[in-house]
Image (cartoon, grey):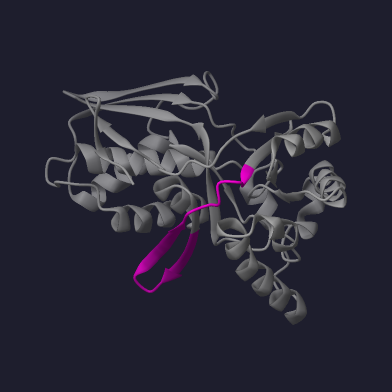
Amino acid sequence: MPATSANLGPAFDCAGLALTCHDVVEFDVLPAGLQVEVTGVGAGELPTDESHLVVRAFRAACAELGWTPPGLRVAAENGIPQGRGMGSSAAAVVAGVLGAWALCPHVEAVDDDAVLRLTTELEGHPDNVAACLLGGATLSWTTDGGARAARLRVHPEVRPVLLVPGATLSTHVARGLLPSTVPHADAAFAAGRAALLVHALTSAPGLLVAATEDRLHQRQRAAGMPQSIALVDRLRGAGHAAVVSGAGPTVLVLVPRDDDVREVGDLTPDGWTVRPLAVDPHGANVLESGREISSR
């Protein structure tokens, strides 16, 4: 399950980007009981009972499918930082739902549309789960019938660099800092920049600095992550396409060259981890005994 970065500046709650940082989750049907094993990020901190998010998502998918395994083993090897705006909860939800779909004896294949709908209901919004599930860059929206998403092919010159602080920030707290309304001029500005973002990501990386400018959510949440906003301002002032990754406090920079990666690192304060990654073009993969049964 890939990490993800949502919003990408102006495309609040609708754009996402899959990243080459992953959680790997194994599922086995047992004769009885529940076994949860966690290694890597969150080991010794995350619950190992029914309250584990992967297990909760798995149970929700089983209810959707009308199937209950007699027992379950979940082994999670986590590589995605948690509470940093890199989609760790979305990855857990997607893993749980895909695990149920793959193991259920009543279905022949994973139904991406149904998985996206259910994971969005569990996560609350589709931007991260869509990118995690489908890979690449995604645009997502909701209809009366549930969430929908489209995948974009990201221009090969676009390279994501994640600047990860030591501090965490919950999505719930970050969303609580947002105003209930925005000025019409800011909404119009965001719509124009979000449209430009699609063009910049897919065809014209040189426009990414302009395309990632935001007026909807980042400045409004500055009180919860002042260091992140200060870093975004510093990087953008130096000509880099820097945004808050999801709800923060991680900062995402979309750079075109290795030289820019070095400059981004030079502008990043001590105590932050600089992680040059790549766009994950595939999204979540499901393997059964080493054999791939779901890929995009």
At 68% from the left and 58% from the top, the residue drawn is 9
Q: Quadrant of residue 292?
A: top left
Residue stretch in magenta: 139-159
User: In the displayed image of the protein, which residue is found farthest to the bottom?
Assistant: 184
Q: Position of residue 141 (x, y in %)?
A: 47, 67
Q: Quadrant of residue 273?
A: top right
Mostly what secondary structure, the magenta segment? Answer: strand
At 70% from the left and 75% from the top, the residue drawn is 187
Q: Position of residue 78 (x, y in %)?
A: 49, 26
Q: Is residue 78 above or below residue 83?
A: above
Q: Which is more toward the observer, 119 or 278?
A: 278
Q: Which is more toward the observer, 282 or 117?
A: 282
Q: Is residue 157 magenta?
A: yes
Q: Is residue 258 above or below residue 7?
A: above
Q: Position of residue 129 (x, y in %)?
A: 46, 50
At 40% from the left and 36% from the top, the residue drawn is 54
Q: Which is more toward the observer, 287 or 210?
A: 210
